[in-house]
Image (tube, rainbow, N blue to C red):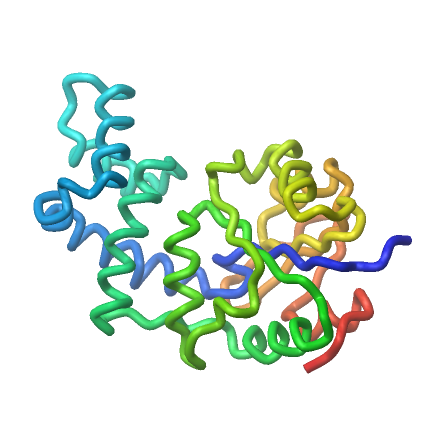
Amino acid sequence: MSRIRLVLLDIEGTTLPIAFVRDTLFPYAARTLPALLETQGDDPRVRVALGDIEREFPGRAPLDVIRDWMARDIKAAPLKTLQGLAWKQGFDDGELRARLYDDVPPALEAWHTAGLRLAVYSSGSANAQRQLYGHTQVGDLTRLFEAFYDLDIGGKKVAESYTEIAERAGVLPGEILFLSDVGAELDAARAAGMRICQLVRAQDDTRPYPGVPQAVDLAAVAKEFGLPVA
């Protein structure tokens, strides 16, 4: 079996508690987005996101679509872009601070120090991912990651997305270990040839997904796959 050269990580339910996203990030974006659309309306990213919404939902107010998407937790790229801009403002202002699971920072540091390559693949925008890992309880961790992948690369439940990530990273799929709490994402990564492991976090009451390796935290992942232990 190929040696693991790159660890690809999901965020929510894998390195960050679902409760932080649900109870802190989402409400913050819902509260601040109306003002952001007014004050940053000339930002090209805002214009593109609003333009995409208007083309998909002609005649509807974009803010109504955004609120509907947020209420139903729809993984729409324009929404993720706008949420990312809102969260950037919160992180920059010091109002937001990401609280990763306690096992995550030491594991990431140990893996990086040992020469393992690290990357993130999340439905949140790449900019939002950088903001989150740049403002954690232990400081800025973005230096540990070589890449941040989002929905621009494709859906997380589609095997071709993982094939594309492997190609961009310049490694064989079998040399990548993908960590996530979501069974359908793990199935897609496995179909692309990656090695996989489900994080079953007691804090998030994650349900074990049949037929895949499982671990309760990143320390257990390290033991399961022979990675450096923090």
Residue closest to the eye, 140 or 223: 140
Residue 49 x/y as whole percent: 27, 34
Residue 214 x/y as whole percent: 71, 60
Residue closest to the eye, 73 or 55: 55
Q: Residue at x 32, y 51 (%)?
A: 84
Residue closest to the eye, 123 or 43: 43
16 in relation to 229, above or below: above
Give the number of marks: 0
Residue closest to the eye, 129 or 22: 129
Q: Is residue 173 left or right of residue 180?
A: right
Residue 221 x/y as whole percent: 72, 67
Image quadrant assignment for residue 94: bottom left
Residue 193 x/y as whole percent: 77, 41
Question: Looking at the figure, which quarter contains the C terminus?
Answer: bottom right
93 in relation to 10, above or below: below
Q: Residue at x 52, y 79 (%)?
A: 102
Image quadrant assignment for residue 164: top right
Q: Residue at x 73, y 37 (%)?
A: 192
Image quadrant assignment for residue 92: bottom left
Q: Is residue 164 left or right of residue 127?
A: right
